[in-house]
Image (spheres, grey):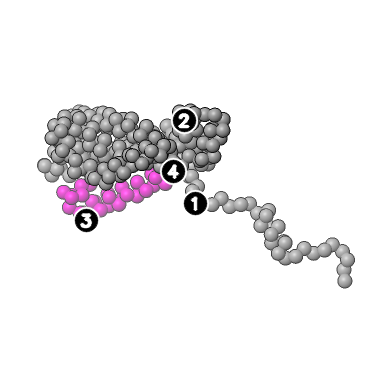
Amino acid sequence: MSLGHATPATGELSTARRAVQPVRRHQLFHQPSRTAFWIWGSAVMAALGIVWFGVTALEFANPYFLPSPGAVWTAGYEMASTGQLWADTSESMRRIVIGFLISTALALPIGLLMGSVGRFEAALEPFIDFVRYMPAVAFVPLTIVWFGVDEGQKYSIIFIGTFFQQALMIMDNVKRTPLDYVRVGETLGLGTTKLLRRIVLPSSGPAIWDTLRISFGWAWTWLVVAELVAARDGLGQRIVVSQRYFDTDRIFFLIGLIGVIGLVLDQLFKIAGRALFRWSSTERG
């Protein structure tokens, strides 16, 4: 029997090997780099464009129903050269900004109070839940009766379609504030106002910003609905005019333009969010 160095058990060796092996980073919830984000996004968009070009080039679809990329680009160039496209775009942008700001200016304080004060939640959440299930498009005839076809009608549709969702989502964002943070603030003697300003808002701020970013996309949807029904200008109204003359190439271009504008604004929201909430970006990795 050898009295030399003792041989460790096989299980202990396996445990030791696992301990020194580098830990693999799990792919779930892993944030891609900005370069990878744009590479993958551009690749998918390019693939869809190639499929679109191939289907139209091989005449698998009637051009009245699916115009070619070249025809869509030509239609957009014609609208832009007359100045009509820029006028419609600026009008839609003005409406969306004003309507969204009106909705947000009311949803932020109401959602904050509902999320932090139980009496506000009990008083307002049933009514907001009741209204938010009503389709905003059903209010279009009423808003025309109430406001006519002027700008107030467009703002009211954006408000109805956006505010009630915003308020509830902001309430949920505020409710996710860790209670430990609030308890520490109470221990330090902070009053209600200071608790909201110094603890609740900074903690829920990144989630609230994401709520605003997402609801801004909903606001675009309701703006186009309002312009489709009653407007003298705007991208939605231009789509209606194009439909009357069966100009599907113009319709495709206008829909694509709305998508591009939305993509750009969404990325600007993300950039602003990273600048405003640097600690949140650092925690996500």
Q: Earlier in the sequence, mark 3 or mark 1?
A: 1
Q: Secondary structure at mark 1?
A: loop
| Whole-percent x, y for residue 3 in the image | 88, 66
Q: What residue did someone put label 1 on?
A: 28
Please report contact status of discs 2 and 1: CB closer than 8 Å, yes or no. Answer: no
Q: Earlier in the sequence, mark 4 or mark 3?
A: 4
Q: What residue did someone put label 2 on?
A: 192
Region rendered in magenta? 40-69
| Whole-percent x, y for residue 88 in the image | 21, 31
Q: Earlier in the sequence, mark 2 or mark 3?
A: 3
Mark 2 or 1: the one toward you:
2
- How far apart are labels 2 and 3 at the CA level? 65 Å
- How far apart are labels 2 and 1 at the CA level? 38 Å
Q: Nearer the viewer, residue 40 or 255?
A: 255
Q: What residue did someone put label 3 on?
A: 60
Q: Earlier in the sequence, mark 2 or mark 1?
A: 1
- How far apart are labels 4 and 3 at the CA level? 32 Å
Mark 3 or 1: the one toward you:
1
Please report contact status of discs 3 and 1: CB closer than 8 Å, yes or no. Answer: no
At x 24% / y 51%, what residue is drawn? 57
Q: Nearer the viewer, residue 269 or 254?
A: 269
